[in-house]
Structures are given as C-alpha cells and as structure tokens.
Image: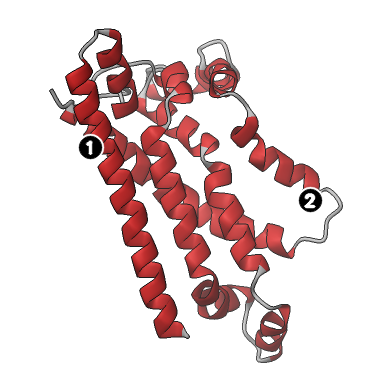
Amino acid sequence: MMDWQALNLSLLLAALTAAILVPVSVFVGRRLALSKSKSLPVIEALIALPLVLPPTVLGFYLLTAFGKGSPLGELWQTVFGHSLAFSFEGLLLASIIVNIPFAMQPIQRGFEAVPQELRDAAACSGMSPLETLWKIELPLAWPAVLTGAVLTFAHTLGEFGVVLMVGGAIPGETKTIAISIYDKVQSFDARSAAEMSAVLLAVSVTTITLTFLMSRKIGRRLS
C-alpha cells in the first residue's frame, strides 16, 4: 500500500530545500567563482564534505548540534517550545546542510564559465554588480542553476541516513518516503516497498528528464 503521506512530506521537504538553498548558492557560488583567496580550497573542501562523509556520521553530528543539550537546541526550545531534533524544522535544516554541495558546486562552476570580459564590460558600462548578475551572468549560467536545483530536489527525495538520524520516523512530520520504504522492507511487505520505490523512481526520472529537455530547448533558443 502506497504511503502517500510520506511521499507528500518528501516532496514538500525537497521543494523547500531547493527553494532555500538555490538562491543562497547563487550568491555564495558566484562569490566563490570570483574569489582569488588562498583559503578557497579549504572552503570548497568543507562544502564538499557531505559528499564523502557517511550519512550516519553527518547525521550524528547534526543530531548533537540540534539536541536539547546544545546551544542551538536550547535556543530553539526556548523560542518555539519544542525540540529542533525530531521535528520537520530540524529535518529541513539538516536537509539544507546535506544538500549544499549538490546545489553549490554546479552553480559555482556555471559562474566560473562566464567570461570575465563580460563582467569588465558591464562594469565599464556603469552596471552595478547586482545588475550584472541579473542581466548578464544569470542568463548565461542558468543551466548550472537549474542543474543545482534538480540535483538538490532529487537527492532530497532519496536521502535516508541523515533523515533517520535527525528526524526519526514520526508519521506526518518526519517520516519520508525513503524511511517508509525501509519500514515496509523490515516488515516483509515487499509489495508496498516495490510500489513506493517505483513511484519514487518515476518522480526522479521524470524530474531529471523534464529538466534536460527544458535545458536543451532554451539552450537552442539562446544559441
């Protein structure tokens, strides 16, 4: 039996993660692309850390940071009256942190590919950095931005380890489709697990395919 509640929660989590992370990645990724700092490799390594760190390890550190014994956890408890860990807000914050490299890296590479001569010409024409970003850089780097958004959305749908560590499996609040599939397998309900896996696979493939089609169509228009 399909767990629609878990699927809807996963879609909401993925949409909010992409909506928050992509605009941030545009400004931070552009800054990193233009940076000449010697500390840039260290910053890039920290951004890429969720790609190589085991999800359970990252989830443990996030759970420790969000728990009641931590400054952030205590502050959250005081302001909102409930724990940050094992809540949807904590799950969203953890999802944003886990997905930083999936959004940031392609967007940074997109801005690195924009010729510096265009930025120099825009500056000579009196355009502000914000105008240059909006009118020149984003129209050229949009495929990278779109790629970052899709990767973030698709990866959030399938995230398991960090979601389980930070959010647990509270139905309607933190139980995502990946956790629900795991529960079905544990209870030997292979048919339900297969149905939900097929739906998740279809959503992921459709999202990526539509993105590639749209990217090629707009790319042909621009060329």
Q: Residues within 10 Å of mark 2 (few under 14, many from 20)?
A: few
Q: Residues within 10 Å of mark 1 (few under 14, many from 20)?
A: some
Mark 2 or mark 1: name the one nearer the start of the chain. 2
Rounded to the nearest angstrom, the CA distance separating label 2 from label 1 is 40 Å
Task: Classify residue 170 as left or right of residue 116.
Answer: left
Residue 215 pos. (x, y %): 41, 69
Q: Which residue is mark 1?
A: 199
Q: Residue at x 57, y 73 (%)?
A: 133
The reply to whether dot 2 and dot 1 touch (C-beta < 8 Å) is no
The scheme the figure's colours follow is secondary structure
- Nearer the observer, disc 2 or disc 1? 1
Task: Classify residue 48 as left or right of residue 193.
Answer: right
Where does the N terminus fall, quadrant-wise?
top left
Amino acid type for the residue under numbered disc 1: Val
Image height check: is 167 above or below 204?
Answer: above
Q: Secondary structure at mark 1?
A: helix
Amino acid type for the residue under numbered disc 2: Leu
Q: Which residue is mark 2?
A: 40
Residue 7 pos. (x, y %): 24, 33
Residue nearer the viewer, 196 or 12: 196
